[in-house]
Image (cartoon, rainbow, N blue to C red):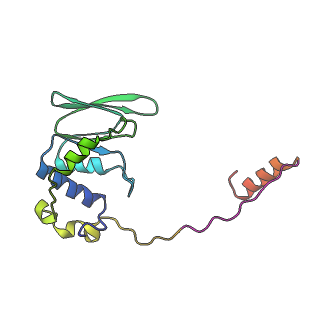
Amino acid sequence: DALHGTDVFGTSLVLAKAVEKAGFDLVVCGMASTDGSMGVLPALLAERLGVPQVTLLSEVSVGGGVVRGRRDGDAASEQLEAQLPAVVSVTDQSGEARYPSFKGIMAAKKKPVESWDLEDLGVEAGEVGLEGAWSRVEEAAARPARTAGTIVTDEGEGGRQVAEFLAGQKFI
């Protein structure tokens, strides 16, 4: 409940404290979330942890104390690397998901799950949640219903009618 309304800055704080407490060599993040779609959490997390970040990777490999990856852009691909410990984010092109077997699922159910609250992580309640959010949504309204469009039946004048409509809307 104390995290309700937390923005990406508060989320990065809580995750960084949890990762530090658990210990890590490599933190793997997705490229965006379904809540804010900001894509900045890996960078904020790396900054809070004081480790390098390598983001938007479509391929990842780890070996010899280094994480390596390929970032694909519109015009070129880059080969990147960073010393561990590090934070990486991967794109949806980074590989197919591996699904656990039934045996793996049953074994996972027997594993203990440790839960930490803000106090366990050393986070003050005022640093997160709505109170600690650096940004907030002041107002939200549902989109208005779509109105019916204009149907142009082409009987020789369709092109002119479309052009007049576009010009009237100041699209051309």
Query: Which residue is painted at 77% across and 51% down in the image?
Result: 162
The front one of 114 and 157 is 114
Above or below: residue 60 compared with residue 47: above
Q: Residue at x 16, y 54 (%)?
A: 113
Q: Nearer the viewer, residue 79 or 24?
A: 24
Q: Which residues are magenta?
A: 143-155
Q: Position of residue 133 (x, y in %)?
A: 29, 66
Going 20% across and 45% down the picture, which residue do you hit? 107
* Image quarter of residue 121: bottom left
Outermost residue toward the right in this view:
156
Q: Quadrant of residue 152?
A: bottom right
Horizontal side of 56 relative to 140 (left or right) equals left
On the image, the x and y values in percent for residue 37 come to 39, 53
How many numbered badges does the structure rendering display?
0
Decide if residue 46 is in sight here: no
Q: Is residue 1 left or right of residue 146?
A: left
Q: Position of residue 35 (x, y in %)?
A: 38, 58
Residue 69 in view: yes
Is 150 in the magenta?
A: yes
Q: Which image quadrant: the N terminus?
A: bottom left
Instruction: Please say whether residue 111 is one of the residues in the magenta stretch.
Output: no
Identify the main secondary structure in magenta.
Answer: loop
On the image, the x and y values in percent for residue 88 come to: 27, 40
Taking the spot 21% from the left edge, 57% from the top edge, the residue there is: 13
Give the side of residue 163 with respect to residue 112, left or right. Answer: right
Q: Is residue 3 above or below residue 54?
A: below
Taking 10 as reference, is 50 left or right? Answer: left
